[in-house]
Image (tube, rainbow, N blue to C red):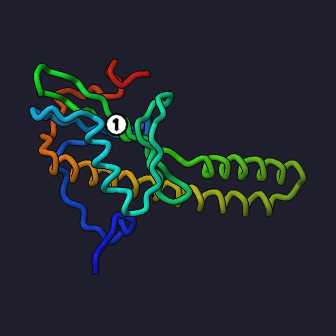
């Protein structure tokens, strides 16, 4: 029996090869890779798409106006916005910085707004039982969304590590606690 990336509960994830810089405030993590083979960000993004498309992940590519390069959806509740920047260090030497931001889908955001509005209306109309049930359903839905976001984040981390090994990218360990997101490179 073979496993796919959509069956994340069955996958035995490898131990991390590179240190993940997590920004809890931004709900994102960053990775950095070194190459002396002249690999550009488009190569990395294409390899990520090549790995995810056969597993039925929906992938939207940036048309030039977004703060992300790829938007990867898993199910109806969660998505990851992937951004890659390349630092040229002369010749074929490059540093590829990858930022994965975990986000709720538009449907998940609309559902949360709907739960809030329905709860407020129920309270205003004097139906505390309906408000309680709505809050309980919303809490369950929030836990499902959180679980799926974390699962998608783990899967994308593993995909990035697999792609990095295939194209011989070397992970860079951060030397300070400054987030890649705080650097001027990834700021809009």
Horizontal placement of 135 versus 23: left or right? right
Res 4 → quadrant: bottom left
Is 56 drawn above or below residue 25 in the view shown?
below
SS assignment at label 1: strand
Q: x, y (%) of residue 167?
A: 16, 46
Please report the residue visible at 49 percent of the width from the left and 31 percent of the height from the top: 66
Residue 110 visible in the shown view:
yes
Q: Position of residue 62 (x, y in %)?
A: 46, 36
Q: Position of residue 76 (x, y in %)?
A: 56, 57
Above-or-below relation of 59 to 101: below
Task: Tell me if I can see residue 173 in this picture.
Answer: no
Image side of residue 75 versus residue 11, left or right = right
Q: Quadrant of residue 173?
A: top left
For residue 35, what is the image quadrant?
top left
Query: What count of labels does the image hold?
Result: 1
Question: Which residue is nearer to you in this view: 124 or 38?
Answer: 38
Residue 45, position in %: x, y? 32, 42
| Nearer-the-camera pick, 120 or 112 | 112
Image position of 99 (left or right of 171): right
Q: Residue at x 32, y 53 (%)?
A: 50
Seen at 57% across and 55% down, the residue is 142
Query: Looking at the rendering, in which quadrant would you find the C terminus?
Result: top left
Q: Which residue is mark 1?
A: 99
Characterize the local packing of mark 1: few (<14), some (14-19) or many (20 or more) Cα atoms within 10 angstroms. many
Residue with the most extreme bottom position:
1
Which quadrant, please, contains the N terminus? bottom left
């Amino acid at each position: 029996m073979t496993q796919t990336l959509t069956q994340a509960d069955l996958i035995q994830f490898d131990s991390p090869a590179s240190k993940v810089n997590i920004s809890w405030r931004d709900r994102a993590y960053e990775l950095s890779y070194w190459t002396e083979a002249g690999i550009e960000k488009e190569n990395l993004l294409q390899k990520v798409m090549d790995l995810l498309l056969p597993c039925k992940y929906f992938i939207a590519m940036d048309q030039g106006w977004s703060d992300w390069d790829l938007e990867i959806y898993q199910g109806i509740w969660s998505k990851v916005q992937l951004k890659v920047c390349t630092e040229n260090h002369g010749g074929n030497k490059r540093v590829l910085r990858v930022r994965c931001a975990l986000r709720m889908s538009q449907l998940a955001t609309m559902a949360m707004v709907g739960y809030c509005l329905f709860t407020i209306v129920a309270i205003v109309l004097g139906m505390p039982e309906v408000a309680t049930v709505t809050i309980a359903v919303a809490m369950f839905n929030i836990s499902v969304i959180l679980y799926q976001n974390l699962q998608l984040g783990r899967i994308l981390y593993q995909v990035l590590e697999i792609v990095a090994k295939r194209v011989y990218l070397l992970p860079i360990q951060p030397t300070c606690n400054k987030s890649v997101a705080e650097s001027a490179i990834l700021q809009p």
